[in-house]
Amino acid sequence: MAKKGATEFICQTCGAAYPKWQGRCDSCGEWNTIVEEKVTGEGFSNFAPKKKGQMLEFVPLSGVQEKLVRLETSIKELDRVSGGGLVPGSVILVGGDPGIGKSTLLLQTCAKIADKDTDYECYYISGEEAIDQVRIRAKRLGLEQSPVKLTSATDVKNIITTLEKSKATVVIIDSIQTMYLEEVESTPGSVAQVRACAYELIKLAKKKGFVLFLVGHVTKQGSIAGPRVLEHMVDTVLYFEGERGHHFRILRAVKNRYGATDEIGVFEMQDKGLVEVENPSALFLAERQGNISGSCVFAGIEGSRPVLVEIQALVSPTGYASPKRAVVGWDSNRLAMVLAVLEARCGMNLSSQDVYLNIAGGLKISEPAADLAVAMAVISSLTNKPLPADAVIFGEIGLSGEIRSVGQPNARLKEAHKLGFNNAITPPTHGNEKKNTSYDMNIYEIGNVQRLINWFN
């Protein structure tokens, strides 16, 4: 391995190391991201420890666990995503596109906690904006009177010295890419700087027991910029999703050591900041128009929460040699599979049709339970026959044309019944599965895609 004082060439996107410079990173495929950095000498094979390590003590799996005490933020959607509240000593990484509302959400969170109890000390450390800029945002949000301690700093050594002498409850670093350590000879935002700064801050958070929020920039692909190890170092990774021109914002947990993953919180961006949405299904369906072909309501599950969203499809004759497939909010490969099954099993001619698919409201769906709703929307648009306006649909489609069962059908039906839907198109019940028939709903079970055509004849 390299000796102390030597140099390595590090990719600033993924952190891959090379012995010499090259234009393209073999690991992530990015161009012109490899930068020369000096090696500090720590962790090399020629490093001799000054003293021997101590023997480790092992304990059995059984034992008395300490009760996990959580700090509630008074923002229910954030508490839901974090697993019921913030755990003291935990580190939360928040990522999202520029301007999506990360700083707004964290400033609101910091102010809510500081207003909750005078014993809670909340520190907001901005590395991107000046103090006056943060104050302008706080005034717009109506938070200028909150006892939040604000500063603008980028030197991690100064930050650590200050926090060691404090009784901090919550600390927000906005953002980790602007922080730097003098001992690391590279520019702020580089892989080495991000890794070293995050390590020092995380170590202090575990030692002092305060909640640490780290704001992270994202790449063009939507992942958090910097080394992938950063996501492994923290306890929770939250992604803030949504379109700038759209007022909905989705806070999604992709990693959580203290709660469920894939849990979502829904916010609405307003003049006074982010407002939590307690019933996202009603909000996503607020602008829906009934009796229109190509539109259907899908009963999905996001984390532990049932969510109803509108799936829109538009099928039109193509003017090109190869038909166009445009997808927003769903997997394009999954759409191609559903269209292939409809052609092969139902005899539908889609090879000469352009297909456009949209998940209304800006929500991104990943579960295969949306297959049946997508197929129904496509057939409805192709035949120009609308589905019943009071029907919800869910189910997975197999390659042989069968409709497979999905998880938590009762939770989906309960949410649909609560919003006034009277009909449900679902997969058949198998084995020990039992649908709750106490709801005043007409449930139609479909076992294969051939029966879909009967709904439009």
Image (spheres, grey):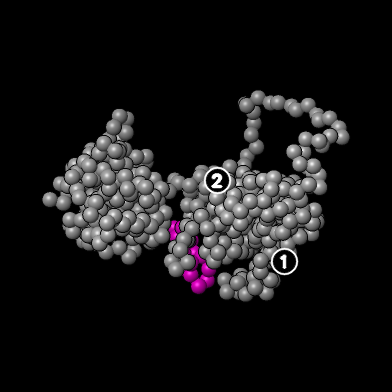
Which numbered disc covers residue 380? none
Callout 2: SS: strand
Question: Circle 1: is it few (<14), some (14-19), or many (20+) Cα within 10 Å?
Answer: some
> What residue do we see at 22% from left, 59% from top?
317
In the image, residue 57 above or below residue 401: above
Q: Is residue 238 left or right of residue 128?
A: left
First along the sequence among labels 2 and 1: 1
Which numbered disc covers residue 151? 1
> What residue do we see at 27% from left, 56% from top?
321
Quarter occupied by residue 451: top left
Residue ID for mark 2: 255
Q: Give percent across and percent down for residue 300.
A: 36, 48
Q: Give percent across and percent down for residue 358.
A: 34, 58
Residue type, numbered disc 2: Lys
Visible residue check, residue 289 = yes
> What residue do we see at 64% from left, 48% from top?
15
Report the magenta stretch's main SS. Answer: strand
Residue type, numbered disc 1: Thr
Provide the residue span drawn in magenta.
266-280
Q: Is residue 222 left or right of residue 3?
A: left
Q: Give percent across and percent down for residue 392.
A: 28, 51
